[in-house]
Amino acid sequence: MSQSKPPGSAEDARRPISMPSVGPDTAKRYWRPSRSGVESLPNALMVSHEQPGIMSMPHWHAQVELNYVFRGDMEYRMHGHMVRLKAGDLCLFWGGQPHQVIDTSADAWFTAIHMPLVNFFRLRLAPGLIHKLMHGASIITRAPDGTDSANMERWLRYLAAEDLQQVEHGISELLMRIERIRFEPFFLVEPSGIPERGSAGSDSTSFANIATICDYIANNFRQDIDCADIAQSADIHPKYAMSVFKRSTGMTLNEYVNLLRLSYAQAMLIRDEANILEIALDSGFGSLSNFNKAFRRMSGMSPSDFRRDSRSVPEGLASRIAS
């Protein structure tokens, strides 16, 4: 399966990953939505290693997101719950639900890895856990592990390498680390806001068909595709495709296609000057009314209101947003 990778070079892969020192003048960072490109690249593995930015508004994207906190702490407002992460925490959540960093310590430093579902479904996690993640739960491990920081630095170098075999090796190691969460004490925080202690579980289900389906949709969601086209990509019957996708992800095929289209439209609304109708059609929606209805259901506001809010900076924050 084809897959994009983050930009980088062999020199980048050899360069040590570093964090800036913390001094008395260290300030919190604020994040502009226009700086994000992940929404329009649902089939790309994207990595950032930086000071987390406090978000002026929520955003969403079609990938799952893995966060590892090297230093300091940060707080998310998720779909129906809050998550506070501290140094050493590893957190995995489904980016398809609106989420927002609402606070950080001034010294915070983390890695965020946005992982396409093609890779997500390679994970040997219990189907019930996959289902909960895709319905807005966040999984957090706080098991002491002195190797995570050093390993994460190596994975970041591998994922930025020009050598695709090195990239794939980094992905495989990263997936194995995520799988190991089920063998450690972890917390599953669900939209109800009630932390639930996790437990290990076996996964006997193959997600090969789902990975193929997600790959096809990610490459073709802006086109006029239907269930028959999607099923044909995996060489399975349309009814089986609908059933296995719903059972594995908790989403219908139509809901997932719409999520990718809305993520793409979100990116266009933030950065482009095209009118709303052009964005609706370019994102794969057949009509403006369908686009408006789907967008409002996802974000709680109209596309035009979202564009206005994404381009405005709350009063008093403009001078503090990093350039």
Image (cartoon, rainbow, N blue to C red):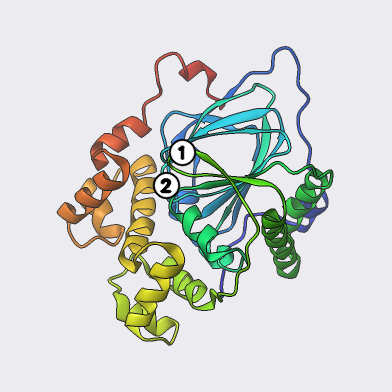
Report x, y in % for residue 125. Answer: 60, 63
Write the residue at 49% across / 76% down.
212
Q: Quadrant of the C terminus?
A: top right
Report x, y in % for residue 61. Answer: 45, 50
Residue at image mark 1: 78
**Residue 144 visible:** yes
What's under tag 2, amino acid-wise? Gln
Residue 159 badge: none
Label 1 residue SS: loop
Write the residue at 80% across / 45% down.
145
Labelled pair 1, 2 in contact (Cβ < 8 Å)? yes
**Residue 41 visible:** no
Q: Quadrant of the N terminus?
A: bottom right
Label 2 residue SS: loop
Q: Is residue 17 left or right of residue 263?
A: right
Report x, y in % for residue 159. Answer: 70, 57
Closer to the chain start, of discs 1 and 2, is 1
Which of 99/134 is in front?
134
In which image quadrant can residue 249 be found?
A: bottom left
Report x, y in % for residue 9. Answer: 73, 56
In which image quadrant can residue 191 be found?
A: top left
Q: Is residue 235 above or below residue 174?
A: below
Q: Is residue 95 left or right of residue 222?
A: right
Residue 97 badge: 2
Distance in Å between CA atoms under marks 1 and 2:
7 Å
Q: Is residue 92 left or right of residue 26?
A: left
Q: Is residue 294 above or below residue 256?
A: above
**Mark 2 Cα within 10 Å, few/some/many (few <14, many 20+)?**
many
